[in-house]
Amino acid sequence: MRIAVLGSGGTGGYYGALLARSGQDVSFIARGAHLQAIREDGIHIESLFGDFQIRPRLATDKPAEVGPVDLLLFCTKAYDTDEAAPLAKPLVGPDTSVLSIQNGVDAAERIGSVLGPQHMLAGATWISSAVRAPGVIKQVSDFRRLVFGELDGTLSPRAQAIYAALQSTGITVELSQSILKVLWTKFVFIASVSAVGSLTRLPMAGFRAVPETRALLTSIMREVVAVASASGITLDADAVEKALAFIDNAGPNIKASMQLDVEAGHRTELESMVGVIGRKGRQLGVPTPAADFVYASLLPVELKARA
């Protein structure tokens, strides 16, 4: 399978390297010092599941050099989606599948409006991985799970082919017939830990057991559930309890990727991870005071990072 990874950072670079190691033909779209390091010395993976290095056939900042592929893994930061989608057009042929595994709940829709909805699949991943240095990706979570599926819920041949390729890497991969429910269920978890972690600047173990902070965490989760319900997506009755249990059982030093960006002074996914809760809530008549508080608190930090 010919695969291109658009956004070769902590998530895309890690999964792309695993796919390349398993025998797939993977090209990496990257930029800057990270791209230069990949060209010169490949991608170095430092992982709880074992360190390794791959030397990709092609790493470039020009998608046209890659051309149409069988599978495009769309892994940019959420705030780069609208800019990156038009740039990805040279990668997409008539039979190309595009799989977004970005944070948030609306990436596939946004990408599909540019590349064509018929190409789109949506996915969610649970992993803690980041670029430690140019060309070096460090994966620190004891989980690396990816769930994806067709937006219409069918078990298509192309989805099954992608599943087989991903399964060969050794990660936990699932093919879902209700991927929108999966995305919103993950969002219950990732939006809340991104919000509270970015406020406290502590790993999950530092805030999950503080009663007052846990109440804020839980309030954001319940607001996400309410917005999902108003959008026509009913989550499991215990979605909040399961998200809290996942946080309680996570490694003590785990931090959400948005929090890592806040701490580094980088631009963040604030709009897609927190701001979207309030925006959708206002559109649907759902109050979201906890998410709105966090958004207002972090927005000055975000604006400084963008300046």
Image (tube, rainbow, N blue to C red):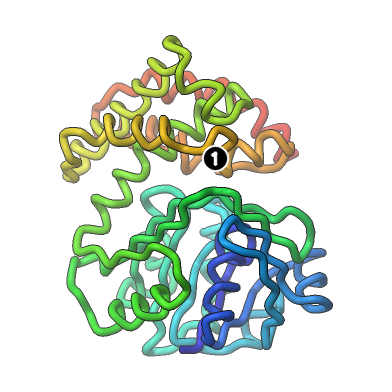
Q: Up-down: is 263 above or below 15?
A: above
**Location of residue 154 by image quarter:** bottom left
Q: Is residue 201 left or right of residue 194?
A: right
Quarter of the rendering containing residue 172: bottom left
x, y percent for residue 169 = 47, 74
Q: Residue at x 33, y 35 (%)?
A: 243
Q: Which residue is mark 1?
A: 256
Horizontal and vertical percent position of residue 78 = 52, 52
Along the horizontal axis of the image, is 159 left or right of 145?
A: left
Q: Position of residue 142 (x, y in %)?
A: 50, 50
Q: Residue at x 53, y 63 (%)?
A: 75
- Answer left or right for 212 relative to 64: left
Q: Residues within 10 Å of mark 1 (few under 14, many from 20)?
A: many
In this view, the residue in front, 223 or 132, is: 132
How many labels, in total?
A: 1
**Picture layout, residue 3 above or below residue 264:** below
Q: Position of residue 262 (x, y in %)?
A: 66, 35
Would residue 183 appear left or right of 137 to someone viewing this image? left
What SS does tag 1 mark? Answer: loop
Q: Amino acid at mark 1?
A: Ala
Residue depicted at x 73% and y 67%: 31
Judging depth in this view, the residue of 152 and 25 nearest the camera is 25
Q: Residue furthest top?
A: 212
Quarter of the picture containing the C terminus is top right
Q: Nearer the viewer, residue 94 or 258?
A: 258
